[in-house]
Amino acid sequence: MRVLRDRKGAAAAEFALVSLLLMTMIFGTFQYGSLLFTYVAMEDAARNAARALAVCAISTESDAIAQARPTLPSWIAAGNFTFSLPATADANDVAFQISVPSSKATILSLVPMPEMLTTSVTMRYEPLSYAPGSCLSGA
């Protein structure tokens, strides 16, 4: 009878169960926070490069990559990523796309993530004295 009333260690057992759930939620928050931060930085870099291409401040894909690279977080800029200038439906548009494996954008691989993290920005050409598309040497 005394064994059923003995509560020594009950708090430790409850803490072990609750802390496991709490730590999983904290790591998941860090994981998705890192992924979201990386995505926003990629979108900002793509927007800056597309804008520079659209106003003819730069004219080549390598210049656009050089424009975008400093905006990216260091764990992406030094790692595996791809830049591209995808074709657009309208000749008066320019698009810039950045893709990164999501494993480079996360802290731990505990939470399921998409395989690739991709962002693409499209902007309208706005050159003052150029015909549409004329400032892009590769287009």
Image (cartoon, helix red, strand yellow):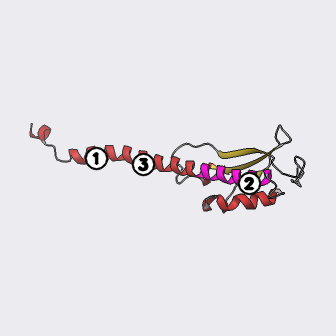
Q: Residue at x 13, y 42 (%)?
A: 6
Amino acid marked by disc 1: Phe
Say what secondary structure mark 1 lies in. Answer: helix
Q: Earlier in the sequence, mark 3 or mark 1?
A: 1
Are the residues flagged by discs 2 and 3 in contact, CB closer than 8 Å?
no
Q: Earlier in the sequence, mark 2 or mark 3?
A: 3
Name the image quarter holding the N terminus.
top left
Please report the bounds of the magenta region as a residue range.
Answer: 38-54
Q: Residue at x 76, y 45 (%)?
A: 123
The one nearer the camera, 42 or 91, is: 91
The residue wearing badge 3 is: 26
The residue wearing badge 1 is: 15
> x, y percentage for residue 15?
28, 47
Amino acid marked by disc 3: Ile
Type of secondary structure dominating the magenta stretch: helix
Q: Residue at x 70, y 50 (%)?
A: 47
Q: Earlier in the sequence, mark 1 or mark 2?
A: 1
State how far apart marks 1 and 2 are (Cα): 50 Å
Q: Quadrant of residue 56?
A: bottom right
Query: For residue 93, which numbered disc appears in the image?
Result: none
Q: Is residue 112 magenta?
A: no
Say what secondary structure mark 2 lies in. Answer: helix
Q: Residue at x 62, y 53 (%)?
A: 41
The one nearer the camera, 79 or 49, is: 49
**Disc number lying in front (2 or 3):** 2
State how far apart marks 2 and 3 are (Cα): 35 Å
